[in-house]
């Protein structure tokens, strides 16, 4: 199941703090879609250390979309990959 967090209009450090808080609450099997105006490079190392995987891509509505799920959660990873498949 997708959970969406739009931090695109927030000032630093709020996007980082809110994203980390949201992933801590992320139920197993779900993933978080973060809408951000910038590519949040400092976030990625923190996610890695905390047991999360992610995919970052240019966004459709904002600068970037970041998809985050628990490491080893193949169901959430598969859901993210399905969402990211190009449509015809």
Image (tube, grey):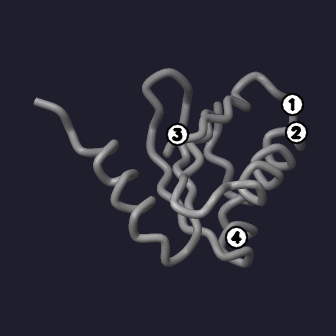
Q: Is residue 25 left or right of residue 1?
A: right
Question: Which residue is at 64% across, 57% downward?
Answer: 27
Residue beneath label 1, please?
11
Question: Which element is circle 2 on?
Answer: helix
Say which label, 4 or 2, has the lower sequence index. Answer: 2
Marks 1 & 2, CB-CB < 8 Å contact: yes
| Gap between marks 2 and 3 measured at Cα | 16 Å
| Gap between marks 4 and 2 measured at Cα | 17 Å
Q: Position of residue 52 (x, y in %)?
A: 62, 69
Question: Which residue is at 69% across, 67% downward?
Answer: 47
Question: Which element is circle 3 on?
Answer: strand
74 up-or-down from 86: above or below:
below
Among the 4 quarters of the image, the one containing residue 86: top left
Q: Is residue 50 left or right of residue 4?
A: right
Say which label, 4 or 3, has the lower sequence index. Answer: 4
Question: Which element is circle 1 on?
Answer: loop
Query: In the depicted view, which residue is nearer to us: 2 or 66?
Result: 2
Residue beneath label 3, please?
65
Question: Which residue is at 55% across, 30% downward?
Answer: 63
Mark 3 residue crowding within 10 angstroms, few (<14) / some (14–19) / many (20+):
many
Say which label, 3 or 1, has the lower sequence index. Answer: 1
Mark 2 residue crowding within 10 angstroms, few (<14) / some (14–19) / many (20+):
few
Q: Position of residue 35 (x, y in %)?
A: 61, 33
| Gap between marks 3 and 1 measured at Cα | 17 Å
């Amino acid at each position: 199941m997708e959970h969406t967090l739009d931090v695109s209009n927030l000032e630093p450090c709020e996007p980082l703090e809110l994203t980390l808080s949201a992933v801590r609450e992320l139920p197993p099997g779900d993933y978080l879609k973060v809408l951000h105006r910038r590519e949040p490079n400092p976030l990625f190392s923190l996610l890695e250390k905390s047991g999360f995987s992610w995919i970052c891509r240019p966004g459709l509505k904002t600068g970037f979309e970041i998809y985050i799920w628990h490491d080893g959660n193949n169901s959430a990873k598969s859901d993210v990959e399905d969402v990211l498949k190009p449509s015809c």
